[in-house]
Amino acid sequence: MAKDALGSGRRLAAEVRPRFESVNQPSPLTHDLKGNPNVQISTQPTALDWDRWYEEGRNTRIVTEIESQNFRTRVGAAEGMTVLDVACGTGGWTRQLARWGMNVTGLDFSAFAIGAARRGGSANGLIRYEQHDVDAAGSPDWMEPGSVDIVSVRCGIAFLDRPLFLRVAGRLLRPSTGALYVMTLISEDEQQHAHMRGLSENEVAELGYGWASCAAYSLGPYRCVVLRGPAN
Ligand SMILES: C[S@@+](CC[C@H](N)C(=O)[O-])C[C@H]1O[C@@H](n2cnc3c(N)ncnc32)[C@H](O)[C@@H]1O
């Protein structure tokens, strides 16, 4: 497995180059928050903006087989593990995590997304969803430090307060074995569409600073990063 030390400043190896399945994705140029068409804006969408976005029938990239296989192999998914899926949206990825027998908590601050996720089922009690603003409140109070095997954030990190989120994830993960999984769109464009944000290559590289190990791979226009050995 070709791994790339993100902290080294080298470009990431395009290790996995599947055909990118462009499904269910809104155009990067759709409308601004006032409904004006074809305008790129850089403000962070609020929970209500996300509600409206989901209400319009939009969603993120559907979970693909290659994405799941890579996660399973590289991050490790074992029955009984405890997983936190941050910015879970309508729960497509959360449900995939539960299919592997893991106990998953899905957090999202959009009431609409959490409602839709709940309607998708709890996978025989393996999934618990909470409407929760990670930027405002960190992790839920009931989650014990060092108790989580995997923190996952799929297509969500560009919307979060990254330093805060990385501290929260590091505190929750089991110290030696816990893994933080980040899947993000790559975008070098500072003027990004509100709901289609990504990180630049430099921002992706910075995610690994201070972690004991850091591996990354590409999935089409996305980077997946696996961090272990939390910094704090
Ligand atoms: C692009 S969607 C990704 C959803 C899902 N992870 C997926 O892969 O389909 C980004 C999600 O981040 C959520 N989000 C943004 N800021 C958040 C915050 N501060 N706390 C919790 N969720 C947040 C939004 O509500 C939205 O559902």
Image (cartoon, rainbow, N blue to C red):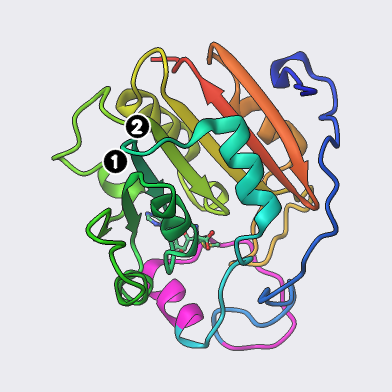
In terms of secondary structure, what is the magenta stretch mainly? loop
Residue 43 inside the magenta-drawn segment: yes
Q: Is residue 186 left or right of residue 172?
A: right
Mark 2 residue's CB less than 8 Å from ligand 1:
no
Looking at the image, can residue 87 be seen? no
Residue 218 sits in which quadrant? top right
Q: Which mark is residue 138?
A: 1
Reply above or below: 3 against 106: above
Q: CA distance from mark 2 to mark 1?
A: 6 Å
Residue at x-position 67% and y-position 24%: 215
Residue at x-position 48% and y-position 31%: 180
| Marked residue nearer the N-terminal end (2 or 1) | 1
The type of residue carrying mark 2 is Val
Query: Which of 65/181 is in front?
Result: 65
Around disc 2, counting alpha carbons within 10 Å, would you say few (fewer than 14), some (14 to 19), or many (20 or more)? some
For the record, the magenta segment spans 35-54
Q: Is residue 189 left or right of residue 101?
A: right
Q: Secondary structure at mark 1?
A: loop
Q: Quadrant of the C terminus?
A: top left
Q: Secondary structure at mark 2?
A: helix
Around disc 1, counting alpha carbons within 10 Å, would you say few (fewer than 14), some (14 to 19), or many (20 or more)? some
Q: Quadrant of the N terminus?
A: top right
Query: Circle 2 is placed at which residue position?
Result: 168
Give the x, y percent position of residue 185: 69, 52
Query: Which of 68/232 is in front?
Result: 68
Give the x, y percent position of residue 198: 67, 51
Reply above or below: 28 against 129: below
The type of residue carrying mark 1 is Gly
Q: Is residue 86 left or right of residue 20?
A: left
Query: Which of 98/202 is in front?
Result: 98
Mark 1 residue's CB less than 8 Å from ligand 1:
no
Residue 226 inside the magenta-drawn segment: no
